[in-house]
Image: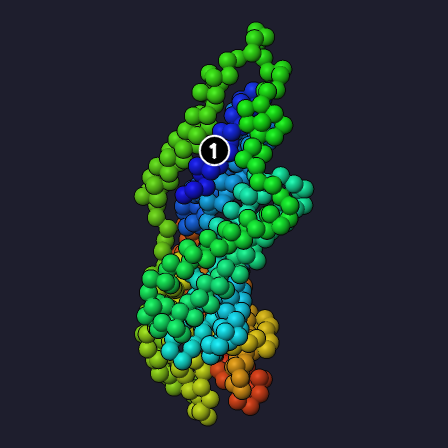
């Protein structure tokens, strides 16, 4: 919420020089049109960050149209600062958040141990004698990372000093976000040890985020001072000051300089209102188009049709997902079942079906978050019986203490399978845009490594060969 007014203030301080240097640039309308095209794409494909990106990109196009490239350079940072209010793409968030979860949990457990608190860590789960804490995605520090990067960028912009030092100050936002998140988790563990679990899980758990962010802010200012950077409220007006002498040579067709006040009065509101009006119009057209033809949402599969007995395998439903998994994944339908071969070898099957991108993730992250370590990973092709169909799957070998486990999984959408999460997400996006069936599924099988990895892999492959016809015909994935 603070990003737009800060950007507006920084641009306002350069208003005289910007208005004096303004020249219309027709290609700016093309940039604005491309920005507006992102809006319906984001709405139809349910890509959360594209509508926000569309507004900022369209604003940039109109800025180029009304001001021209030369004047736009004068407010390049205030405009670029607006991009901090756009949510990051899901792929980037998932790529960054889980490593931050693991690092935060690891360092917090280590520091708590040095402080005399007995902590057992299983992945992102921390356990003390009287308290348990899971460093879930909301506690990964991603929100702090975005906020601190924006703050460090702002401080680096208004600071005076060598450019490499100011870039270094901006880059310091990443380690500061990790350090602040570790400090927050450590404080929660220490409060739980001293005052009890209720005190740690109550008011302090929420307030600690604000408190740690304040300390991180002081850390950015301390780094700036240690680097010899001088904070100056007037730096954005350098080269004439925020109200310095305007550039010369801007004339009206008659040769008279246009009144600065009148130009400022027209350019400012036009730049702000034009993209907003067009986005509102585009939104109305998108809604009308959506009412005219809705995406063909796939019906949720009936997993009751998946047989309990297949070949030499006997199945047993395990039960519903736990509340945390249900809340995070929000699947439309799912099945969690254990199959046991006639020789006693067990294999766990889980199939998650849904229409939302957030429903699907890499099982490798879950395994690492549960305390398993990756011992091996490969993509292999499984040849199925019958028509010789081949399914490419991921195969993970994980280990926790003396226990080893083999996990095989793949993704399915519109009769297409892939081991790649990114390809699967692209297919979901493509199906939404092309008004196809928009559902998808994650199929996962787990087996303990009893004799050897090869034996576990062969056992899982045997169950896949027995179940695959039922998954494609009876269940429909």
Q: Residue at x 34, y 80 (%)?
A: 317
Residue 461 location, x and y as percent? 52, 80
On screen, 69 above or below 390?
Answer: above
Q: Nearer the viewer, residue 153 or 27?
A: 153
Residue 152 location, x and y as percent? 55, 47
Colour scheme:
rainbow
Residue 217 location, x and y as percent? 50, 51
Q: Residue at x 35, y 83 (%)?
A: 316
On screen, 368 above or below 26?
Answer: below
Q: How many marks?
A: 1
Q: Nearer the viewer, residue 182 or 425?
A: 182
Q: Secondary structure at mark 1?
A: helix
Is residue 332 in view from this perspective?
no
Residue of label 1: 9
Split into 4 quadrants, where in the image is the N terminus?
A: top left
Q: Residue at x 53, y 13 (%)?
A: 258
Point out the residue furthest to the top here. Answer: 254
Q: Quadrant of residue 388?
A: bottom right
């Amino acid at each position: 919420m603070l990003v737009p007014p800060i950007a507006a203030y920084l641009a306002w301080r350069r208003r005289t020089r910007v208005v004096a240097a303004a020249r219309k640039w027709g290609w700016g309308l093309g940039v604005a049109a491309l920005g507006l095209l992102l809006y319906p794409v984001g709405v139809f494909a349910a890509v959360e960050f594209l509508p926000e990106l569309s507004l900022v990109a369209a604003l940039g196009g109109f800025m180029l149209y009304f001001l021209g490239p030369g004047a736009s350079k004068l407010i390049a940072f205030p405009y670029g600062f607006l991009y901090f209010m756009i949510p990051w793409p899901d792929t980037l968030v998932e790529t960054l958040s889980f490593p931050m979860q693991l690092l935060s949990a690891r360092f917090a457990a280590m520091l708590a141990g040095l402080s005399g608190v007995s902590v057992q860590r299983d992945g992102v789960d921390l356990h003390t004698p009287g308290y348990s804490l899971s460093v879930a995605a909301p506690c990964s520090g991603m929100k702090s990372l975005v906020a601190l990067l924006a703050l460090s960028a702002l401080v680096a912009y208004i600071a005076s000093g060598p450019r490499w030092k100011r870039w270094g100050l901006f880059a310091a936002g990443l380690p500061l976000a990790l350090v602040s998140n570790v400090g927050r988790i450590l404080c929660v563990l220490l409060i739980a040890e001293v005052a009890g679990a209720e005190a740690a899980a109550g008011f302090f758990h929420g307030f600690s985020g604000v408190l740690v962010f304040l300390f991180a802010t002081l850390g950015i200012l301390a780094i700036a001072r240690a680097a010899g950077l001088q904070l100056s409220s007037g730096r954005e007006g350098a080269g004439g000051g925020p109200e310095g002498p305007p550039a010369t040579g801007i004339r009206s067709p008659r040769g008279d300089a246009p009144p600065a006040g009148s130009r400022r009065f027209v350019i400012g509101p036009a730049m702000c209102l034009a993209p907003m009006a067009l986005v509102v119009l585009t939104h109305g057209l998108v809604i009308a188009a959506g009412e005219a033809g809705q995406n063909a949402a796939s019906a949720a599969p009936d997993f009751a049709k998946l047989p309990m007995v297949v070949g030499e395998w006997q199945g047993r439903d395990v039960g519903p997902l736990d509340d945390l998994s249900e809340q995070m994944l929000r699947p439309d339908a799912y099945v969690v079942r254990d199959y046991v071969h006639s020789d006693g070898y067990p294999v766990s099957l889980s199939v998650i079906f849904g229409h939302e991108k957030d429903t699907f993730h890499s099982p490798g992250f879950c395994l690492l978050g549960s305390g398993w370590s990756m011992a091996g990973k490969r993509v292999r092709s499984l040849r199925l019986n019958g028509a010789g169909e081949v399914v490419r799957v991921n195969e993970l070998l994980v280990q926790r203490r003396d226990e080893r486990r083999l996990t095989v999984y793949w993704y399915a959408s519109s009769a297409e399978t892939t081991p790649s999460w990114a390809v699967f997400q692209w297919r979901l996006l493509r199906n939404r845009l092309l008004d196809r069936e928009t559902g998808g599924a994650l199929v996962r099988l787990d087996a303990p490594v009893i004799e050897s990895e090869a034996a576990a892999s062969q056992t899982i492959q045997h169950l896949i060969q027995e179940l695959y016809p039922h998954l494609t015909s009876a269940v429909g994935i």
